[in-house]
Structure formats: structure tokens, C-alpha cells
Amino acid sequence: MGFRITSEPIAPEALKQALEKDAAGACVTFEGWVRDHNEGEPVRALEYEAYAAIAEEEGAAILAEARERFDIFAARCEHRVGRLAIGDCAVWVGVSAAHRGAAFDACRYIIDETKQRVPIWKKEHYASGESGWVNCATKAR
């Protein structure tokens, strides 16, 4: 299990199955969806680009850190690239653990670190016809 950059639609149920373990008492998942606005501006679509090799390497490091820091059984993250429509799932994180506290903490850690460190760039396409790159700052180790 690991971190993956994909141009294909994310399949949350299939990803969740990979986290199942008889000893798990908790599974926490996060889905980041494309919304129709940002900072008061109507958004029609998003485009994501990534440096896949580095993104997957840094993402794998984040998952390894989560396994070391939190008492979890498994963790996984997928992030889409390409053009996404309103409502599409852009990122998915899932964690299984014996207890909910560790699962919640690890899930939040993974999404927060992914947004901070993984080289993925987002371009918003606005209703006005304009577009712009947002949240482009990354800081890889």
C-alpha cells in the first residue's frame, strides 16, 4: 500500500478494502472534492499537475512517517492529476488502526503533510473564463 498519483478517477471503496484487517477497530478516510468556488470566485473546473516520481517518493515518506508516529495498521493516499470537474474526488486518504484516535490523527497528518510537501500544483478555471494557479508553494525535504 502506498501513495499514488493517478489520472484515473479515484475509487474510494476499492481503496478502503485494502485497509481492512481483523484487528482494526477503526477506519478513517478523507475525500477532497472539487468545489464550485474559492475565495468568493465561482470555479468551473480544476487542473492538477504533479512531478509524479518525486510526488510519489515524498508521499511514501509521509505514509512511513505516519506509520512511525501513530499506532496504525495501514495507510494509503491517492491524488488525481489532469482536469477535474466539480464534485470529482481530487484526493483520498485512508487509515486503519485498532482505535479511532490514532486513525483520525494519522489521517489528518497525511493530508496536511501531503498538501505542504508533495509537488502537486492546482490550476482553477473560473466562471469568468480566466484561470489561475493557486497554492503552488511546496517544501520537500
Image: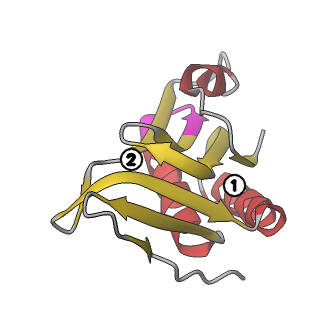
Q: Residue 131 appears in which quarter of the rendering?
A: bottom left
The furthest residue to the top: 22
> Decide: marks 1, 2 in contact (CB < 8 A)?
no
18 relative to 51, above or below: above
What sort of colour scheme is used for the picture? secondary structure
Type of the residue with mark 1: Leu
- The residue wearing badge 1 is 63
10 relative to 120, above or below: above
| Magenta segment boundaries in residue numbering | 94-101
Magenta span includes 64: no
Quadrant containing the N terminus in the rendered view = top right
Quadrant containing the C terminus in the rendered view = bottom right
**Is tag 1's residue or tag 2's residue first in the polypeptide sequence?**
2
Q: Nearer the viewer, residue 67 or 89?
A: 89
Q: Is residue 110 left or right of residue 62?
A: left
Q: CA distance from mark 1 to mark 2?
A: 23 Å
Magenta span includes 95: yes
Q: Is residue 53 left or right of residue 3?
A: right
The furthest residue to the left: 40
Type of the residue with mark 2: Val
140 relative to 109, above or below: below
Q: Nearer the viewer, residue 80 or 132?
A: 132
State which mark lies toward you, 1 or 2.
2
Circle 2 packing at 10 Å, graded few (<14), some (14-19), many (20+), is: many
Q: Which residue sits at x=40%, y=51%?
A: 45
- The residue wearing badge 2 is 34
Q: Residue 132 appears in which quarter of the rendering?
A: bottom left
SS category of the residue bearing label 2: loop
Q: How far across and down, in percent of the image, does residue 125 sit?
A: 39, 61
Q: Is residue 99 left or right of residue 18?
A: left
